[in-house]
Amino acid sequence: MYSLISLQFFSIFFAKNIEYLCLKIQRWIMRYWALFAFLYSLSFLKEINCACQSNNGIIEFALIDINWRKSIGREIIAKVEYWLSRSNENDRFSFCSGKHQFTANRIYPAFFVCPHSRSFLNHEPLHIYRVNYKDDWKVKFRVLNDYLSKNSGKPFLFYGSFDVSYQLLGVFAGYISNDSIVLSENLSYELFYKLIKVLDLLDPISCENLDKFYLALYKNGLINSISSADILNDFYDYKTRLFSEKGLQTSFLGFFSVLNDSLDACLIPNISTLSLFQKKSQYIDRCFRYAKNIQRLVLKISACSLELLMSTLDDKMRIFNWLLTVTKIEGFYFDDTENTYNPIKRQNVCGFIRPEIPIRSSNLLKAVPPEFFLNLSEANQQRITYLRFVNIDICFATFQTIFEKNKVSFLEAAYCSSVECQKITKFLVKMPDLNIFKLRDMEMRSDDANRILCSKIRVLVLDTCTICNDSVWSLEKNYIFKYEIMEHLRTLSVLSSRLPLDLIQLLLRSMNLENLNISNFEFLPANSSFSVVAFQGKWNYLQVDKYIPTDYLKSFLRGYSVSFLSLCESRVFSDIQFFFNTGYFSSSVKTLDLSDNSLTVDNLTLIHNFRNLKYLNLSASLPLNTDDLPNLRMFDTLRALDISRNNITSKNYDFISRFTVLESLSISKSKIEKGIWINVLNDQLIASLVSLDLSGVDMYFSDFERIRYCKKLKYLHFKVATDCFLFCYFNILGLASMKKNLNILSVETEGNICFDDLVRLAGFSNLSEVKIESYTFLPVGQEKFVKYDFLNPEFRLEMGLRHYNLDVHTKEILREMFDNYSFSIVSH
């Protein structure tokens, strides 16, 4: 009891004095930083040895020995410790627990004793294969890490229909440890696929040595092997016999990383894309294991990487076609950017997430060589359902045969300057399954418009498009029966375009239209002798940013309701004022985006008209003075408020503090007047907040301390003060009751990060994502080594360094700390 009281007293005392202690530690560390570096250099090798696993990393595999099935001596069988057994001849063998022995040392079936009373003939001996997993296997596996962590004292067993023999694991171990003797031997067709199957069963963790494994298979099996033709043709269909359909993608994606010495690959699961890029200094999780959850996998190649790839494929096109087949690549995405890792994106905590729109490149466009598609096998051509070209020069004549063989459902051409629109739209009649069609920066002719209208497109994007001056489009008679798009269109975007009024009228009349982006759109005069009458409807999303006033839109929208309304960057607020008074909008709008507007208190008062508003974005729009703002309904109903990129002062902070049930708040990149944060984060907000974004906000450490009282907080983004260290913030959060709830953490600091900072994350067991941006990594504090055990097995950590400086030893320690989790260190 005494110790408990003492501990409570110490916690209270420490909490009250945490800021003082942290500042004191900062000064001490800065004064003796050189000494830290010196001690580190003396003790580095010693500290590495602290990173050990249970059982000293020794693993005993219990395996079937193929040679023992042919012949086994009595002396050997007498020493067998583990067995498989079955209850009868028709049953399947499984592990037989307990001690087995021969009585009176007589090695005969009649004297064999099984603890489950099964006969010797229904047993099979297991051969022990012992490996020093920690030191000899340079590739680590999630399945083996999990086995070691349990420390069960039992041998490791492979479960499932695929039998891993003693001989097979011996070859596998040779490839994993890069054994020159094993690698010098011929690799048979059957063994090639079985080695990949063993890798699949153990679930490898991304690392440079895993690339060496794939490179050895690539050279010994696909290039320099007499079995390469058999592997590529796969007459015995090992791909189907050994792997599930999902396992194919996961296990074979590693070959993309070894196609060229200058190329690397990673999977970006949230956009179902496999990215090929030029190698750079970084340590990443390639995320290949997530491919099993992807329905359609697309291969993304930048223009520069494509040039390197094409130089490789001159004499290896058969291998590339085989790889596309086994990984079931269904599409291609070409542009001038490189996605070099799977990033943890700092999402808007208030839910204001907009689709990413490609930006026009100022560089000279590079071309996709026609032979890339022409040299694809017929099976790979037929599988194509996705094609995207951004800031790239492409000859669409190449696709004449491709469009006739496949079922393309997604096609985008953006900022492909040399491409004429008609060269694209003429293929629409050959793509009856096209669901998504996106054109950007195109001049259309009347025939192009008609081909689009006659299609069954569900998502149509015509951004920065217009009708040619010498072309006139007009409605045709009986258009309702001819224009099939009116039955299928669900999403329409005409951002920054100039198109005829009657063409847009027709598209807006589509029976199933749900989402509309008509931002910065200019209506051209109609050429038809009649117009389409509006009717009542319900939309999910309406985006009218940079609104250009038009009487047609005002009258048309009177019959509609919408859930999400965006009115950003308005030139004059009075132009958009009618949206607040449109009949159905008052009851239907739940999400309102008014970012980048010059608002007054009177303008804010109009928000009161939206009776069911739950989410509000006032980024870069908050008036400097809100003293005269009356009590509004939204103060008691709003769930999420984005107030980023504003100046928060004593004249307008009360706008934030008046909300009573706010769950999500973003003050990102705002300037907060000194001394008012305690008034902003009042008791009501402390009690209700679940998500808080303070990224880019220069906040005093003493102000940050108040955040620890937010008991419900699950999502937190913040910036470390320039005169403070990251571990001080983690100490504050470690004392908070939110510690058990915190799920997503994002931190940015202009200073450095070290092992000591990362060790403090171990106390936040409920974390699923951590993103830290800093200047560089200092290898200090590894003596506090911790193996992480987060509740979420899909925990991800990303460290972005402005100065990438990691050496091999530091990466080894970090890998052991996060050995079962997704972990990436990249340069920014």
Image: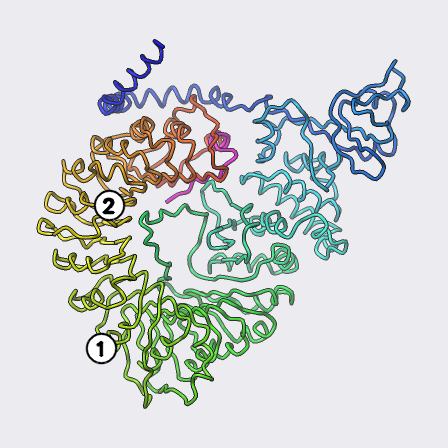
Compared to residue 410, the image places residue 86 above or below, namely above
What is the x, y in percent for residue 388? 47, 65
> Outermost residue toward the top?
2
Q: Which residues are magenta?
A: 812-828
The reply to whether dot 1 and dot 2 touch (C-beta < 8 Å) is no
Q: Which mark is residue 666?
A: none
Q: How is the image coloured?
A: rainbow
Instruction: Inspect the magenta stretch and tell me whether residue 227 lies in it.
Output: no
What is the x, y in percent for residue 293? 55, 50
Q: How many marks?
A: 2
- Whether residue 644 can be seen here: no
Q: Secondary structure at mark 1?
A: helix
What is the x, y in percent for residue 641? 25, 49
**From the viewer's perspective, is the residue at label 1 or at label 2 nearer?**
1
- Whether residue 566 can be seen here: yes
The N terminus lies in quadrant:
top left
Mark 1 nearby-residue class (10 Å; few <14, some 14–19, many ≥20): few
Mark 2 nearby-residue class (10 Å; few <14, some 14–19, many ≥20): many
Q: Secondary structure at mark 2?
A: loop
The residue to which callout 2 is attached is: 667
Instruction: Measure the C-alpha gap from mark 1 to mark 2.
Output: 37 Å
The residue to which callout 1 is attached is: 551
Residue in front for this viewpoint, 487 or 474 = 487
What is the x, y in percent for residue 314? 61, 61
The C terminus lies in quadrant:
top left
Compared to residue 506, the image places residue 668 above or below, namely above
In primary-sequence order, the first of circles 1 and 2 is 1
- The amino acid marked with disc number 2 is Ile
Which residue: 85% across, 37% down? 89
- The amino acid marked with disc number 1 is Asp
